[in-house]
Image (tube, helix red, strand yellow):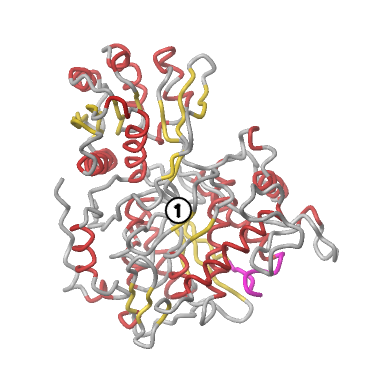
Amino acid sequence: MAENPQPDHEGHPARRAGRIVGRRALVAALAATGLVAAVVAGVQASDDDGASGPAATESNPDGDVPADTEAVAPGNGDPPDGAASPDEAPASLEDLEARWAVDRQAMVAALSAPGFGLGADNILRGPGGFQLDLGACPAAWSNTEGVDPSTIVLGHTTAQTGNLASAGRVTDGLQAYIERVNLAGGVAGRQINLVVKDDNFVPTATVEEVGDLLTTTKPFAISTLGSPTSLAVYDTINDACVPQPFVISSHPAWGDAANHPWTIGLQLSPTTEAVLWGTWIEQNLAAELPVPVSALVMDNELGRLHEQAFQAWADSHPGVVASFTPVHHPAAAASVSGEMGQVAATRPRVFLAMTAGRPCLQAVQEADATGLRGGAAALFLPSSCRDAATFLAPAGPAADGWRIMGGGLKTTADPAWADDPYVAFVRRSLSEADLDPADPQSSAGFALFGWAEVEALRVAAELPGGLTRANLVLALRGLQLHHPFSLDGIGLTTSGIADPWPLEGSEVLVFDAASLSWRTDGDVLDVNGTTPPCPWNGSSC
C-alpha cells in the first residue's frame, strides 16, 4: 500500500517549535525500510479506554503514615532489603518496588550514556534516532516551567460533566494515585499539584482549557483524555514544547514521534491490534500458510485505518496472507447482511471485523447464517466489541469460538487477580479513596496511567540536569519498564522514533457461548518494536 503523503509544515512557523531534527530525512529513511505504513485508528467517539497503574508500601516502621493508607514511593531509595530479585515473579509490594527501582536505575544509566541528553547545541538526543531541537521552541519557553523546589504542577483535561462524564472517573483514579505518592514524599522531594480542567468531552472546550493552562497555570506537562479532545490540542501542545504524556486514548496518532515529539500514548493501539492479528495467523495457522483473509470494514476513520494497518502488515508478510479482501459498510448502516454475504463469498480462512457497535453483533450472527463461520479457521472481533452481553450473548451458540485481543492488562474486577499484589493494592487504595475498586475507569486512572506518569517523572528527575521537560521527554522516548498492570511478558518500552509505542502485546481471548464468558486462548503475544510509527497527517498515518 502506498504511503500517505506527509504534510509540509515548513511554511507554518508555529510547527517548527520543537521539531525533530531532520524529520523529512528520518521519515524517508523509515519509509525506505518499510517501517512507515498506513495504520489503524483508535478509540471511538465514546473513548471508553480503560487504564490503570499505581504503587504503595505495606511496611510503616516509623508510624508517620498509617500502614493501611501508606503510599508507594518507588524511586525514593534502593530496593528494599530482603526483597525478591526483580527477575522473579513479584510476590509482594516490596518485590514490586525492587523491580521498579532496578528498572529506573537501568533507564537512568542507559539514557545518561554518551550521545544522549541535551547537548551544547540545544538539541536533545535519545534512542531510536530521536533528536529534538529545543532552540525551535517559543522564545519565552522554559525547560523547568511548572517546577520549583517543592512542587511539580501538572495540567490535565478531562470530562467531569456532560454526556461522557463517566470517562472522568479515570481522572478520579489518577488523582487518588497522586495523593498516595504525595503522602509518601512525592517525586524527588516535590509534591505533585494536578490542576484538573473539565472540558465536557467537547473539543472546542478542550482548546479553551489548554489555552488557559498554557497562559495562566503554566504547568510542567499536560495530560489529556479522549481522542477528539486530545487531537484538538495536539499541535498546540507540541508547538508550545510542553510534554503531553500518556494520552488517555488508544488513537494511533500518539505514535507520531517524528512530527509530535512531545506527545505519547500508553494503551494498546488499534495499530498494534492489526499487527497482533497478523502475528496470530502466522503462529497458529503455520501448516496452511498462506491463507486468504477477509474483513468487514466500517466506512469511517476507525475502519479505514484498521484496514490500512492490516494491509500494510500483509504486504510485508506475503508468505502469511495469500489475499486480503476488505468489504466496506456505511457507518450508519442498519444492517450489514449484504456485506457479510459478500465476505462469505470470498471463502476466507480468517475473518476480521474492522467495525464497531451493533455491526459487531450482526457480523457474529451473519457469519453463522451465511456459512462463513463453518469454513473459517478463526474469526476476530475488534477489542472495542469485547462486551459479551452486548455483542455476543444475543447471538447464542453462533458466538462460540470468536476471538478478540484482550488488551494485555490485568483487571481489578476479575477474582482471578485477587492474589496479585499490585491488583490487591489498587483495590484497597481505591476503596480507601471512596472509589469503586472494580470500576475499570477508576482503576485505569490509578493503576495504569498514574503509575506510568509518576515513574517517568522519577526517571527524569535522576537524569543529568534533574527534572526538566527535556528529561521527561527523554524518559518517555526511552522507556524500559515492567508495568505492574500489564500481563507478564509484556513490557513498557519505547525507542525514540523507531518504536514510539509503549505497550505492544495482548492475550488472545476466545468466547465460550455456554458460559457467556471469555477465556484465554494460548500464550500472550508480544510484538514489541514491530508496530510501525504513525506520521500523523491530520486524518491518517
- The span picked out in magenta is 183-193
The answer to which of 452 and 389 lies nearer the viewer is 452
Chief SS of the magenta region:
loop
Relative vertical location of residue 519 with respect to residue 228 in this rendering, above or below: above
| Image-based side of 245 in relation to 372, left or right | right
The N terminus: image quadrant = top left
User: Extreme front residue here?
Assistant: 287
Q: In this view, does 485 lie to the left or right of 216?
A: right
Magenta stretch containing residue 192, yes or no? yes
| Residue 274, x across and y down, in percent | 32, 40
Q: In this view, does 282 lie to the left or right of 383?
A: left
Can the viewer see residue 539 in this picture? no
Query: Secondary structure beneath disc 1?
Result: loop
* Residue at the spot of label 1: 266
| Residue at 51% across, 19% down | 516
Instruction: Reply above or below: 2 against 121.
Output: above
Residue at the image position 41 percent from the left and 71 percent from the top: 242
Residue 538 magenta: no
* Amino acid at the residue labelled 1: Leu
Q: Position of residue 335 (x, y in %)?
A: 26, 21
